[in-house]
């Protein structure tokens, strides 16, 4: 027997026992985290039951990530055609395209929901529709609306109840003039004027969408800038591009009053300079999301906070054998984070002892241009020591010039001491695609990536150029006129940043 390996026969007996008497795992919530947890548990031999009160796929697939990006895709296509020097269709009226855009969005959602349902069925996950609640750490009650209620016994429970839109005091959505993102995704007419409260990624994506469709958009953000926490250089550039394209952005501002009238709304907006009146046809609430904490957690001995369900690194709650994942737990609310949570929880349920180690999380915002980021910001990196920064503008990218999308840049931050990549920040065409490459670079050596050959003409060439520029070696940038400090890799490099 090889030292360090588990004995073969006991493992075989474990597998036989699991097959004959599979672990009963109940998952509450069929969003990205919940359905991934159900599939992973089933793959590992569990008898998995998934309970969903609405539609499989949760907010992301039905009311968030997917439908928003479907509409943004079509709006960008329209924008590209209208800007084209070849097709010249400036006279096209976007309002006539809204209905077919909504139809296509619906088909995209339906196709992907059906795909998830097929995946669940193929893994023999039992899907039950209805409202679930906790009775104990080992029991779930299901109210299905038809046969009353059903008690489900479980060896382990995974909670994935998701999140819900936040509201502001005195600004209750009415589904007509004051709307949430749910209503915005089903809107029947493009509003002439749209005010969006909230300059986070949800607000900025909707500002992009309706601006591309011809609305006069105003974003009201209470903080110092939009997209708080993001690399400052990206934020400054995105704000400049949005304002250039007609989006009005009011930061350090708040809506102090709203009056409804026949034409829409009259808003009193307090800014650092003065209080101003803004007329709008619609007001979109995009002030973020909060965990859905409507289950009877106390009956199962589960501790929560206003930020969500408390979990350890195994995604286990304060109640043994009850796990929680996704938007409902303390931490960042992203679909891809929820999916990874689901994998971690399911594997721990099935005895694999895996930890969520809060890895560097990729973030992308589908604005125009797109924004993508992973790793440390310049400010965070400077706090850790000397750094070097490479930048490459998309104006110097052949592929970007071909596509007519030259706004933006790539910024790569690395340690001057050991050449380790600390952060990659992108604003520009295909930023969300480049992010996957950037994710593999973090904590690797900068020089390693510069040795890879990138196909020509492609956008990833720009990422390689940004990496080369960190040492002053970019090929497709003019030689700097200022003096440069020696590079640790030879030649001449950029001065160190602190």
Image: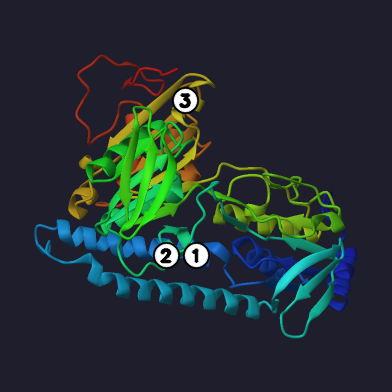
**Quadrant of the image containing the C terminus:** top left
Task: For marks 3 and 1, give the one nearer the viewer.
Answer: 1
Q: Residues within 10 Å of mark 1 (few under 14, many from 20)?
A: some
Q: Residue at x 73, y 60 (%)?
A: 159
Q: Is residue 66 left or right of residue 392?
A: right
Q: Check residue 185 in the rendering and tell me which mark sits there, or answer none.
A: 2
Colour mode of the rendering:
rainbow
**Quadrant of the image containing the N terminus:** bottom right
Q: How far separated are the C-alphas under marks 1 and 2? A: 7 Å
Q: Residues within 10 Å of mark 3 (few under 14, many from 20)?
A: few
Q: Is residue 246 left or right of residue 136?
A: left
Mark 3: secondary structure: helix
Q: Is residue 8 left or right of residue 50?
A: right
CB atoms at circles 3 and 1 under 8 Å apart? no
Instruction: Looking at the picture, tell me which residue is in the foreground, 19 or 189.
Output: 189
Residue 264, quarter of picture: bottom left
Task: For marks 3 and 2, give the one nearer the viewer.
Answer: 2
On the question of residue 430 being in view, the answer is no
Q: Is residue 85 left or right of residue 440?
A: left
Q: Check residue 63 in the rendering and tell me which mark sits there, or answer none.
A: 1
Give percent across and percent down for residue 318.
Answer: 83, 49
Above/below status of 383 relative to 195: above
Above/below status of 96 relative to 170: below
CB atoms at circles 1 and 2 under 8 Å apart? yes
Instruction: Looking at the picture, tell me which residue is in the foreground, 439 or 471.
Output: 439
CB atoms at circles 3 and 2 under 8 Å apart? no
Above/below status of 239 relative to 294: above
Label 3 vs 2, first from the N-terminus: 2
Q: Check residue 379 in the rendering and tell me which mark sits there, or answer none.
A: 3
Q: Residue at x 40, y 18 (%)?
A: 496
Q: Check residue 434 in the rendering and tell me which mark sits there, or answer none.
A: none
Label 3 vs 1, first from the N-terminus: 1
């Amino acid at each position: 027997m090889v030292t360090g390996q588990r004995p073969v026969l006991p493992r075989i007996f474990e597998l036989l026992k699991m097959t004959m008497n599979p672990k009963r795992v109940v998952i509450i919530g069929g969003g990205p985290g919940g359905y991934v947890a159900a599939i992973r548990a089933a793959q590992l031999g569990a008898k998995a039951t998934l309970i969903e009160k609405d539609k499989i796929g949760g907010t992301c697939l039905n009311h968030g990530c997917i439908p928003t990006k479907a509409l943004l895709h079509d709006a960008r296509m329209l924008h590209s055609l209208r800007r084209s020097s070849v097709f010249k269709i400036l006279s096209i009226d976007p309002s006539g395209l809204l209905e077919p855009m909504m139809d296509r969005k619906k088909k995209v959602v339906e196709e992907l929901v059906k795909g998830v349902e097929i995946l669940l069925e193929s893994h023999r996950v039992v899907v039950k529709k209805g409202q679930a609640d906790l009775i104990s750490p080992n029991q779930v009650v299901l109210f299905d609306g038809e046969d009353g209620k059903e008690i489900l016994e479980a060896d382990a429970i995974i909670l994935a109840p998701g999140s819900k839109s936040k509201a502001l005091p005195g600004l209750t959505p009415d589904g007509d003039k004051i709307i949430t993102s749910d209503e915005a995704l089903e809107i029947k007419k493009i509003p002439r004027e749209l005010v969006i409260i909230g300059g986070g990624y949800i607000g900025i994506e909707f500002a992009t969408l309706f601006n591309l469709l011809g609305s006069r958009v105003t974003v009201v953000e209470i903080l110092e800038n939009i997209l708080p926490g993001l690399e400052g250089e990206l934020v400054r550039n995105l704000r400049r591009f949005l304002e250039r394209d007609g989006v009005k952005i009011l930061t350090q501002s708040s809506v102090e009053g709203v009056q409804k009238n026949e034409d829409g709304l009259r808003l009193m907006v307090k800014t650092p300079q003065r209080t101003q009146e803004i007329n709008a046809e619609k007001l979109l609430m995009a002030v973020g999301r909060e965990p859905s904490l409507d289950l009877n957690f106390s009956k199962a001995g589960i501790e929560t906070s206003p930020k969500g369900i408390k979990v350890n690194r195994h995604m286990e709650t304060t109640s043994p054998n009850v796990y929680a994942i996704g938007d409902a737990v303390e931490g960042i609310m992203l679909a891809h984070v929820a999916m990874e949570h689901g994998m971690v929880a399911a594997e721990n349920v099935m005895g694999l002892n895996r930890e969520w180690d809060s890895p560097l999380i990729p973030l992308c915002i589908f604005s125009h241009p797109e924004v993508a980021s992973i790793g440390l910001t310049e400010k965070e990196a400077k706090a850790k020591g000397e750094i070097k920064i490479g930048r490459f503008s998309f104006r110097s990218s052949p592929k970007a010039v071909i596509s007519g999308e030259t706004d933006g840049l790539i910024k790569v931050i690395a340690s001057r001491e050991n050449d380790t990549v600390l952060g990659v920040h992108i604003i520009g065409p295909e930023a969300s695609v480049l992010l996957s490459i950037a994710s593999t670079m973090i904590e690797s050596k900068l020089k390693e990536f510069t040795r890879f050959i990138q196909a020509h003409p492609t956008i990833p060439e720009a990422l390689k150029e940004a990496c080369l520029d960190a040492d002053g070696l970019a090929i497709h940038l003019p030689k700097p006129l200022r003096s440069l400090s020696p590079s640790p890799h030879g030649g001449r490099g950029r001065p160190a940043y602190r």
